[in-house]
Amino acid sequence: MKAVLEFNYPEDTDKCRRAIHADEAFMALQEIKRSVDRKFTHKSDLEEVLKYVYEISDYVLRTTGEETEDV
């Protein structure tokens, strides 16, 4: 099977970058899950878990060129 993706530059720059980094995003999600499973138990403080997930997510987004937006 062959798939061809086409993007209109410059309008689709973000879509192209996300397609290129999809493997890294998937691996990051797997690593977040493994890390949380290893580091935390069911009795862990939810705020601590969420802070940890945020830090990992932020690192991945920065290293793949996706800037996080402050909400």
Image (spheres, rainbow, N blue to C red):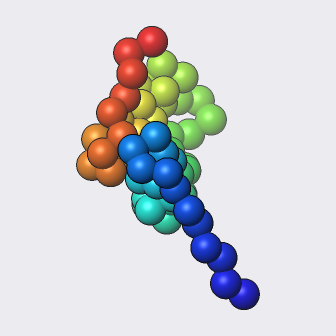
* Quarter of the rendering containing residue 30: bottom right
Residue at left 41%, top 31%? 54
Q: Is residue 28 left or right of residue 56?
A: right
The answer to whether residue 30 is above or below residue 65 is: below
For this rendering, which residue is in front, 70 or 27? 70
47 displayed left or right of 5:
left
- Toward the left, the furthest residue is 63
Residue furthest out toward the right:
1
Q: Residue at x 45, y 12 (%)?
A: 71
Q: Percent position (x, y) of residue 18?
A: 47, 51
Residue farthest toward the bottom in the current orientation of the protein: 1
Q: Quick check: 17 left or right of 46?
A: left
Say which residue appears at 39% left-offset and 21% top-offset: 69
- Residue 59 in the image, given as x and y percentages of width and height: 30, 42
Where residue 70 appears, x then y in whole percent? 38, 15
Expressed as whole percent of the image width and height from the top left, the position of residue 11 reads 46, 40
Of the pair 37 and 41, the residue shown nearer to us: 37
Quick check: can you spot residue 35? no
User: Toward the viewer: 57 or 18?
Assistant: 18
Q: Quadrant of residue 66?
A: top left
Q: Is residue 37 visible?
A: yes
